[in-house]
Image (tube, rainbow, N blue to C red):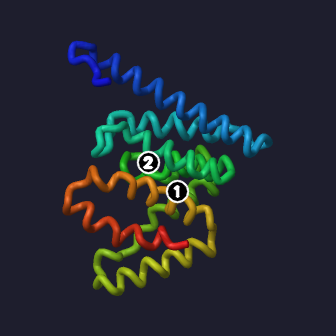
Amino acid sequence: MAPSSNAPLNFHRDRTERQLDVRFEELLDKLRKNRPSEDPWMVRRAYEIAAERHRDQVRTSGEPYLTHLLEVAHILADMRLDATTLTAALLHDVIEDTEFPISNIEERFGAEVAHLVEGRHENWPAHMMAPEARQAENVRKMCWLWFNDVRVVMVKRRIACTTCGRLNFLTPKNSSALPAKLWIFMLP
């Protein structure tokens, strides 16, 4: 059902926020069920920060950006991963899309979460390489990440999965370049 055009904008925002909050509570339920000994505090705090930092961001589809973060976290929760990994999933774009430095993540959540988030955004000079060298560098990065902490690869792969599901909303220019960036994360 399409929203009424004469309803106040804050009504729609409030309804969307409630839906996101319900989806988040479902995530916490999965964590409690799959990992009863884990404290959900860290995941709750990460959600609050992500919601605050991505508040006005929307995806090309028109959905709030927070939807993507929750999707990634839900996929990882379905895999029975720990609270640390779910926290990193919720924060994975905070350092890239907002002015929230990795040092703040480390200070608030610890070095392990910061490593998982930072591993998602390793800044290597791939833009200066030929396409073949860039592809080889991607494989090298994946091997390096795999040997250091497999959870980084799992987070990246789930991000790639949710991104591929949104290809129809991208411009032709962006959607044609994306598969080359994501193929490495889709390998078994």
Q: Residue at x 55, y 66 (%)?
A: 153
Vertically, is 70 above or below 121?
above
Residue type of the residue flagged with mark 2: Val
Q: Earlier in the sequence, mark 2 or mark 1?
A: 2
Task: Please tell me how crowded label 1 is: few (under 14), some (14-19), or many (20+) other residues with Cα within 10 Å.
Answer: many
Residue 28 got which mark?
A: none
Residue type of the residue flagged with mark 1: Val
Cβ atoms under marks 2 and 1 closer than 8 Å: yes
Q: Residue at x 50, y 42 (%)?
A: 70
Coordinates of residue 83 in the picture (x, y in percent): 66, 47
Coordinates of residue 42 in the picture (x, y in percent): 64, 40
Quarter of the figure with residue 183: bottom left
Task: Please tell me how crowded label 2 is: few (under 14), some (14-19), or many (20+) other residues with Cα within 10 Å.
Answer: many
Look at the numbered disc 1 and give the secondary structure of its residue: helix
Residue holding disc 2: 94
Residue holding disc 1: 117
